[in-house]
Image (cartoon, grey):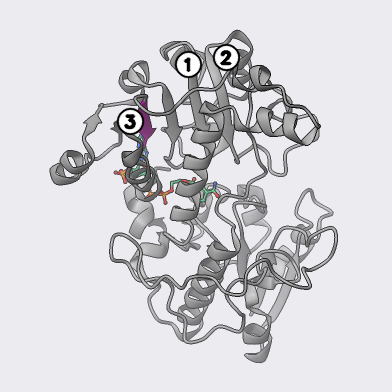
Amino acid sequence: MKILCVLYDDPVKGYPPVYARETIPMIQRYPDGQTTPSPERVDFRPGELLGSVAGALGLRRFLEGSGHTLVVTSDKEGPNSRFEQELPDSDVVISQPFWPAYLTRERIEKAPKLKLAITAGIGSDHVDLKAANERKITVAEVTFSNSISVAEHVVMMILSLVRNYLPSHDWARGGGWNIADCVERAYDLEGMQVGTVAAGRIGLAVLRRLKPFDVGLHYTDRHRLPSQIEAELGLTYHPDAASMVPHCDVVTINCPLHPETEHLFNDALLSKMKRGTYLVNTARAKICDRDAIVRALESGQLAGYAGDVWFPQPAPKDHPWRTMPHEGMTPHISGTTLSAQARYAAGVREILECWFAGKPIRKEYLITEGGRLAGVGAQSYSV
Ligand code: NDP
């Protein structure tokens, strides 16, 4: 089989000759009890850079040793890209949300042999799921592999916005000692009301991590959490985002991008927020209206916006979120720490081992199968 894998570019200064840490903690189970990926073996050392082209998700020896062809590229845009050139005779496509190879309907039509699309990470919105279903292409992702990685990033971004960390750091780097300039926008998180749109794996992990900060916690989701979790965390449930946001000082977005959530945060919803709300979006950029976010920051309706998700990815140099006021943006990195890479690389290997052996892929990894939403996809997505 031919496996076409699209990964982000290698570091500009070359592969790290040595890593910052010798080892990474090995996690056996996720908070809900689900086991971490369990391939028969892996051919990499956890903690290595696997997510860029030369790392090849640690799959090269396994795939080539079993007689398959592996093509790895970062060149993914437009009809002359290596991705489009290699697609027509590929059986399997592997892509990452951080550097998404958009599997549009047109591209799916150009790939008659394509049967499996694997997301190395979580979030398969870069695949046209309707078109994939029509062709009975299986779409799978490595559920939970980087949920805690993202939750940690969310907490970091909330604290850095509220406490005005990045501008203060700039003063320090620039040789200044301008305390008043640093603190004129700095607050404590303690006592604020924090709400999450969705309390799935990431959203709930964010709520759990914020509990010790003595904040009021709010959520909205399509399904309500068990009452004992609501009681344990002191959660206030709201039926939808519009009814939740007026109560919040900080809002974090943790739902998938699908037709129900696209452009949910538009001028109308932003105008329902308290003036000076902080918004953190590590879910997907298109859940927000790009220009409405810029307007809200310029007017002061939002006090800050941070996140790591953009549209398109990579974001063009002139994307307004790079330069809007009071932003704390990063490239799409929250779910691709070296710790997360070890888990999703192992998860991709597990999915491939199952696929080659004709064994069922874990239900929790499935988004679509046999022409319909399946497994975790049937729970969280709509087409
Ligand atoms: P989960 O599937 O565990 O949680 C998603 C939750 O969103 C579910 O509880 C689901 O509801 C809920 N939901 C769906 N639609 C709506 C809606 N219209 N309003 C409110 N809630 C809704 O996923 P994760 O927590 O693991 O990941 C969430 C998203 O985060 C991913 O889809 C991905 O887009 C993004 N992500 C980003 C990463 C990054 O690196 N920045 C990495 C990983 C994920 P229910 O199931 O109850 O119906």
Q: Where is mark 1, residue-wise?
A: 270
Is 155 in the magenta? Answer: no
> Callout 1: 10 Å neighbours few (<14), some, many (20+)?
many
> Callout 3: 10 Å neighbours few (<14), some, many (20+)?
some
- Give the mark toward the camera: 2 or 3: 3
Q: Where is mark 2, residue-wise?
A: 296
Which amino acid type corresponds to the residue marked 1 in the rendered image? Leu
Gap in angstroms between the C-alphas marked 1 and 3? 22 Å
Q: Residue at left 57%, top 14%?
A: 296
Q: Quadrant of residue 230?
A: top left
Question: Do the CB atoms of the residues marked 2 and 1 lie less than 8 Å apart?
Answer: yes
Ligand 1 falls in quadrant: top left
Where residue 344 sits: x, y (%)? 52, 66
Magenta-drawn stretch, dominant element (helix, strand or loop): strand
Give the mark, 1 or 3, whose residue is nearer the N terminus.
Answer: 3
In this view of the protein, can residue 119 be seen by the observer?
no
Q: Quadrant of residue 216?
A: top left
